[in-house]
Image: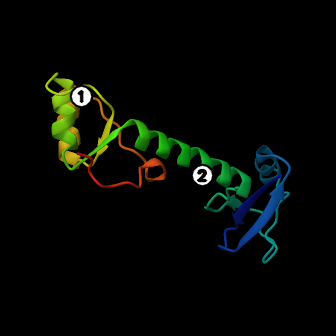
Amino acid sequence: MIKYMLKCCQDHEFEAWFGHSSDFDDQACRGLIACPHCGDVHIEKAPMAPHIRTSKSNTRKFDEIAEEMRRDIEKNCENVGDDFADTARAIHYGDAPERGIYGQATIRQAQELAEEGIETLALPDAITPRNKTKLN
């Protein structure tokens, strides 16, 4: 089943359910859909936001995976803080030991690293380590 917000020529809006998305097109072409307010059969789909159903178990599973990724990053990578761009550059050019790092970079710094062929990845907030202090 699919629900559409519909609109007639008089701008009356109403909802209707259909078995399949193609059912609306078929029924509208044959004049089988009428506005419940004025009886107009010239009906079109009105804009509407999609409804996305989420379950708490899926959210919980995502949170667990994100937490595991966050712990792995904290355990296996060094937080270089604001020195991220300089440290990434030093590792890339062999001036510093190769290792996993994370930290902060400005958009301009990230663009400059990309222009130099230095691959980086912006971490989504969900997996960004909570330990923001720089390790020395």
Q: Residue furthest bottom?
A: 37
Which x, y percent locates residue 43?
72, 61
Is 47 or 63 nearer to us in this picture? 63
Mark nearer the viewer, 2 or 1 = 2
Mark 1 residue element: loop
Which x, y percent locates residue 132?
33, 55
Which x, y percent locates residue 35?
79, 70
The amino acid type, in three-letter code, at marker 1 is Ile
Which x, y percent locates residue 104?
26, 49
User: In this figure, which residue is indicated by the disc labeled 2?
Assistant: 63
Callout 2: 10 Å neighbours few (<14), some, many (20+)?
A: some
User: In this figure, which residue is indicated by the disc labeled 1?
Assistant: 118
| Direction from residue 76 to residue 29 in the image, left or right | right
Is 13 or 3 nearer to us in this picture? 3
Residue 65: which quarter of the image?
top right
Q: Residue at x 81, y 46 (%)?
A: 20
| Direction from residue 16 to residue 128 in the image, left or right | left
| Direction from residue 4 to residue 85 in the image, left or right | left
Q: Residue at x 55, y 43 (%)?
A: 68
